[in-house]
């Protein structure tokens, strides 16, 4: 097994609401892109064995940070497992010619009810070596903060 990156957060919403935000195309486009990026979903099939393609665009591509092009990351995500409202397992492959980003990364989103709402834990396994650990964990944490804002505003 390769590298493992993790992040987590408690979100003030029930697990079913948080789970649902991972299976709604429009909501994913809003909250999944981390700080400094915007996202667009090109293909959408929300079922086990289905998946989606997301194009992430850097708002400031200075230094050419993209994996697919200077300003973009394209990622094909497959839904490997959907267990409402407990877990979503995704398999992500970046569209790139750079071998340091090659391979399939597994993203496991787990949801546990707490007194404050839902504890969300994201575990990324087999992370490609070209992805900086600190930047990746910060990106996941940013997406979780966006998710919290999205579902908490909708519930509010």
Image: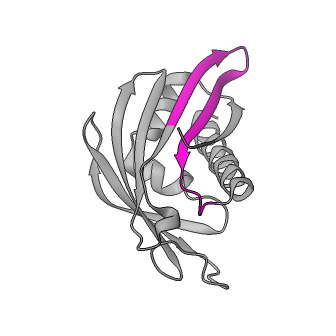
Q: Is residue 116 above or below residue 134?
A: above
The reply to whether the magenta stretch includes residue 53 is no
Q: Residue at x 37, y 28 (%)?
A: 82
The image quadrant of residue 96 is: bottom left
Q: Locate residue 50, reporting x and y percent.
A: 25, 42
Q: Is residue 99 above or below residue 150?
A: below
- Foreground residue among 135 and 117: 135
Q: Residue at x 52, y 56 (%)?
A: 30
Q: Residue at x 53, y 80 (%)?
A: 71
- Foreground residue among 72 and 97: 97
Residue bounds of the magenta highlight: 108-131
Q: Locate residue 95, reporting x and y percent.
A: 39, 67
Rendering colour mode: one colour
The reply to whether the magenta stretch includes residue 122 is yes
Q: Residue at x 39, y 39 (%)?
A: 23
By secondary structure, the bulk of the magenta-drawn segment is best described as: strand
- Foreground residue among 142 and 1: 1
Q: Locate residue 120, reporting x and y percent.
A: 62, 30
Q: Is 52 displayed left or right of 27 in the figure?
A: left
């Amino acid at each position: 097994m390769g590298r493992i990156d993790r992040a987590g957060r408690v979100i003030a919403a029930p697990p079913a609401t948080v789970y649902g935000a991972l299976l709604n195309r429009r909501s994913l486009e809003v909250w999944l892109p981390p700080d400094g990026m915007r996202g667009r979903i090109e293909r959408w099939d929300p079922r086990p064995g289905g998946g989606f393609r997301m194009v992430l665009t850097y708002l400031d591509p200075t230094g050419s940070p993209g994996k697919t092009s200077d300003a973009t990351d394209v990622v094909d995500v497959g839904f490997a497992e959907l267990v409402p409202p407990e877990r979503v397992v995704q398999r992500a492959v970046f569209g790139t010619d750079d071998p340091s980003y090659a391979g399939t990364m597994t993203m496991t989103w787990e949801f546990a009810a707490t007194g404050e709402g839902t504890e969300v834990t994201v575990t990324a396994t087999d992370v490609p070596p070209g992805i900086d650990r600190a930047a990746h964990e910060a990106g996941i944490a940013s997406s979780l903060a966006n998710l919290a804002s999205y579902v908490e505003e909708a519930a509010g």
